[in-house]
């Protein structure tokens, strides 16, 4: 089964993790919300699939391009 | 043949008048037959087998592409009988691999260069370089847009080999890749594009790629030979790379037809040349119909994101948005649209991506779009909602200061009307880049606008040394937030109008009318016409 890496588009802080391992998600669904530039920026998946692993926790800083979740199709 | 009887030759061997007439008749018949034979050979391109292979996979050939692009029967070919200047290739180079000429698109004349890959991979030769040069020269001097249909393998071998080959083939046209934006250029990448097809694609004002086509300096094969890099063509120069990473393509589509339709659509927003105003079209029924509910497109909290394209779609003429580089630098939307039937160029922050914080890609995209609009007399509308520029080490590595100032300088050199509307946030330097102050001809703001040097939370920390949760933080924050409201700048006339959101379309229509370039018949000064075509 192909693994999909979900990356963040912006450097910031993980504000809220919305998705949990095992969740079935559709393209465009938010997996977590980052705080950056005083904005709530959703991290969305571009593909549908099942959440395999969330690699960050709330309050953790993340950098642009960092993989924050793994999904399976 | 004439029916006159044959006449004997005169004593001195000269022919009598009737003999001359006879010979001429025979000759012209033979010549016409030769004409037809040569014409047929030229139109046969690289041969039935190669053409059939393309047809089998649904890819049009050069002549089919030209026919699809142009108004029916309007193509006037230039150089049908041109062939390679090399004796050995003369019979296998119909039209010398580049189908060139003049056609009409929507009734307007354009110059066309269509690469015929079935003839020696549409490689560049001495003859076909002259054909391209003629197309560009006529287009520039007579005010015709140029269309390049790209699919070429690069310089022709062995013609270009050796110092003699280089001296003969290269550098004989000092204007070959010069861009001064006298007329719009549109390009489609419709196959492997190495060499000239790649160069003309990136020199163009609009570049559409068909998925599966490749745009690169050189082929994977040469990469493998020269630098031992084994690379997949898609990774080297596919549509994802150029629409998402390099921004060298404005649009990616699935088929040849969609690519050619995109070129027609793009040119329909543009004037034929830089001394002309863009065409005016009818206003579709229902335009502005959603204005009453436009405020509902903004989220409840000031920190939440939304898709600015929905707001844009509500304001402009119905169905008139042609978004350029939609997958690149997404924190900014650049789109050709119509307002009241007139072409406008929209630069809009999009909070849906990076919260609307502009990164270096977004800056490059805004800069190149600004240059396009100003060069072709297209008024610019800025829709503003940005917390600022992306900062941090990644941004600095990508030369953020340089990109921000290029964008700023471009905006300051604009001579077409610039109108800005502050929808929500406008902070710091980004306030100026998005048309704040005198960087627009008119600044309007919604009552939801908030403008300051930085977000009130940061400002309270810096000015008062207070963190959220500490005593007096809330009080100081409330004061800073209040100071960011639009009324302060309205009171010092830094915005010329505070408008009800639902009146945005009407306001822009009215102000656009006011700012028509009457003194020059709608034509700007084109101060950036020699700016780069990519950054």
Image (cartoon, rainbow, N blue to C red):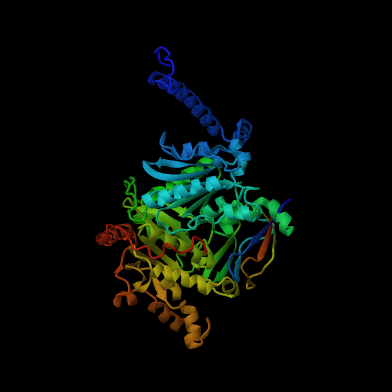
Q: Please give the name of the residue rendered at 69% of the width and 65% of the height, measured from the top-left corner.
A: A55
Where residue A19 appears, as percent x and y from the top left, is 63, 60
Where residue B135 appears, as percent x and y from the top left, is 45, 47
Where residue A17 appears, as percent x and y from the top left, is 62, 65
Q: Is residue B26 left or right of residue B56?
A: left
Above-or-below relation of B194 to B93: below
Above-or-below relation of B76 to B456: above
Viewer-nearest residue: A48 or A66: A66
Where residue B506 appears, as percent x and y from the top left, is 29, 57
Q: How many marks?
A: 0
The image quarter containing residue B451 is bottom left
Above-or-below relation of B514 to B45: below
> Is residue B216 in view from this perspective?
no
Above-or-below relation of B253 to B381: above
Taking the view exactly as shown, the residue that stands out farthest to the front is B11
The image quarter containing residue A69 is bottom right
Viewer-nearest residue: B134 or B149: B134
Viewer-nearest residue: B301 or B459: B459
> Is residue B482 in view from this perspective?
yes
Viewer-nearest residue: B285 or A69: B285
Which quarter of the figure is the N terminus of chain B placed in? top left
Q: Is residue B404 left or right of residue B437?
A: right
Q: Is residue B65 left or right of residue A6?
A: left
The image quarter containing residue B370 is bottom left
């Amino acid at each position: 089964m192909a693994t999909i890496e979900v990356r963040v588009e912006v450097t910031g802080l993980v504000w809220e993790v919305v998705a949990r391992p095992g969740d079935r998600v559709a393209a465009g669904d938010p997996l977590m919300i980052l705080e950056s530039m005083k904005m709530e920026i959703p991290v969305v998946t571009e593909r549908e699939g099942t959440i395999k692993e969330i690699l960050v926790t709330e309050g953790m800083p993340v950098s642009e391009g960092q993989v924050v979740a793994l999904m399976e199709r | 043949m004439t029916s006159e009887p044959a006449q004997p030759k005169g004593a001195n061997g000269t022919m009598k008048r009737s003999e001359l007439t006879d010979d001429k008749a025979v000759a012209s018949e033979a010549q016409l037959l030769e004409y037809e034979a040569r014409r047929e050979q030229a139109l046969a391109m690289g041969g039935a087998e190669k053409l059939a292979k393309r047809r089998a996979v649904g890819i049009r050939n050069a002549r089919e592409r030209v026919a699809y692009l142009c108004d029916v029967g309007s193509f006037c070919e230039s150089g049908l009988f041109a062939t390679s200047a090399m004796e050995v290739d003369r019979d296998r180079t119909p039209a010398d691999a580049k189908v060139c000429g003049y056609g009409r698109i929507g009734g307007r004349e354009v110059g066309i260069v269509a690469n015929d890959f079935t003839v020696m991979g549409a490689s560049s030769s001495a003859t076909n370089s002259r054909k391209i040069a003629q197309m560009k020269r006529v287009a520039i001097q007579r005010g015709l847009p140029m269309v390049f249909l790209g699919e070429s393998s690069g310089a022709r071998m062995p013609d270009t080999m050796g110092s003699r080959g280089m001296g003969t083939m290269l550098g004989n046209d000092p204007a070959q890749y010069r861009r001064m934006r006298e007329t719009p250029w549109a390009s489609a990448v419709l196959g492997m594009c190495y060499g000239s097809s790649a160069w003309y694609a990136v020199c163009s004002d609009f570049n559409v790629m068909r998925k599966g086509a490749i745009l690169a300096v050189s082929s994977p094969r040469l990469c493998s030979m020269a630098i031992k890099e084994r690379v997949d063509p898609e990774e080297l120069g596919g549509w994802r790379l150029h629409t998402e990473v390099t921004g060298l393509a404005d649009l990616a589509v699935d088929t040849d037809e969609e690519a050619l339709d995109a070129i027609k659509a793009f040119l329909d927003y543009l004037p034929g040349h830089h001394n002309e105003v863009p065409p005016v079209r009818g206003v579709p029924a229902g335009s502005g119909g959603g204005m009453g509910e436009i405020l509902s497109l903004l989220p409840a909290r000031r920190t939440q994101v939304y898709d600015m394209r929905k707001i844009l779609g509500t304001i402009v003429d119905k169905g008139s948005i042609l978004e350029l580089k939609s997958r690149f630098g997404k924190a900014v939307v650049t789109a050709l649209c119509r307002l009241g039937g007139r072409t406008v160029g929209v630069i809009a922050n999009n909070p849906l991506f990076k919260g609307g914080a502009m990164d270096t890609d977004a800056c490059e995209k805004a800069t190149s779009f600004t240059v396009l609009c100003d060069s072709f007399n297209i008024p610019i509308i800025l829709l503003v909602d940005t917390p600022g520029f992306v900062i941090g080490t990644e941004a600095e590595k990508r030369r953020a200061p340089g990109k921000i100032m290029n964008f700023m300088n471009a905006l300051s050199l604009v001579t077409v009307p610039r109108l800005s509307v502050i929808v929500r946030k406008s902070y710091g330097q980004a306030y100026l880049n998005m048309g704040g102050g005198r960087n627009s001809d008119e600044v309007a703001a919604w009552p939801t606008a908030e403008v300051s040097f930085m977000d009130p939370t940061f400002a309270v920390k810096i000015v008062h040394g207070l963190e959220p949760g500490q005593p007096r933080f809330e009080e100081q924050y409330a004061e800073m937030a209040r100071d960011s409201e639009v009324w302060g700048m309205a009171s010092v006339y830094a915005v010329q109008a505070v408008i009800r959101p639902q009146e945005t379309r009407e306001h822009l229509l009215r102000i656009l009318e006011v700012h028509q370039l009457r003194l020059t018949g709608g034509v700007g000064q084109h101060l950036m016409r020699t700016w780069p075509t990519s950054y």
